[in-house]
Amino acid sequence: MTLYVLEYRYTDARIRAGVRPRHLAYMRSLVDNGTLVMAGPWADQSGAMVVFSAEDEEHAWALVQADPYTIEGATTEHRLREWTVAIAARPVGRS
């Protein structure tokens, strides 16, 4: 598997609040199946970063497109990049 980092910005706070329970349930399901490595909002609440473990970029984009935040328009400016970890406290990434 390959690591992909997703960065995005939030749009409307009202939309985000309404969709958040479904978004969190989706993200928890990705943790459970080993696809989500970590995720969280920026401290200024302008957006968030997500790290996926995916087969390829197409698979990573499919994960983004299935997120209720994406579906409902709670996020914008999605930027997905393959990430190579050079140093880590414990092994991550390709298996």
Image: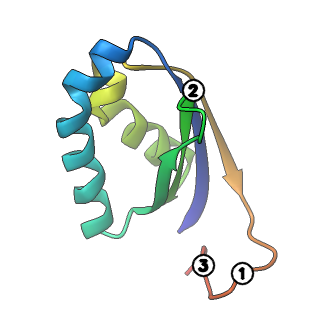
Image quadrant holding the C terminus, namely bottom right
**Image position of 61 (left or right of 23):** right
- Foreground mark, 2 or 1, reads 2
Q: Is there CB contact under 8 Å for labels 2 and 1?
A: no
CA–CA distance in space, label 3 to label 1 = 7 Å
Whether residue 73 is visible here, answered yes or no, is: no
The answer to whether residue 86 shows anywhere in this view is yes
Image position of 11 with respect to 95: above or below: above
- Amino acid at dot 1: Ala
Q: Residue at x 60, y 73 (%)?
A: 93
Q: Is residue 14 above or below residue 95?
A: above
At label 1, counting other C-alpha atoms closer than 10 Å, the crowd grade (few under 14, some 14-19, many 20 or more) is few
Determine whether, in the image, residue 74 is placed left or right of residue 93: left
Mark carried by residue 48: none
Badge 3 marks a residue whose secondary structure is loop
User: Is residue 34 depicted above or below 52 in this figure?
Assistant: below
Q: Quadrant of residue 31?
A: bottom left
Residue 46 % position (x, y): 57, 26
Q: Which amino acid does label 3 sit on?
A: Val
Q: Which residue is drawn at 72% across and 81% down?
A: 88
Q: Name the residue under label 1.
A: 88
Furthest-front residue in view? 44
Number of marks present in the image shown: 3
Give the amino acid type for the residue marked by disc 2 in the picture.
Answer: Ser
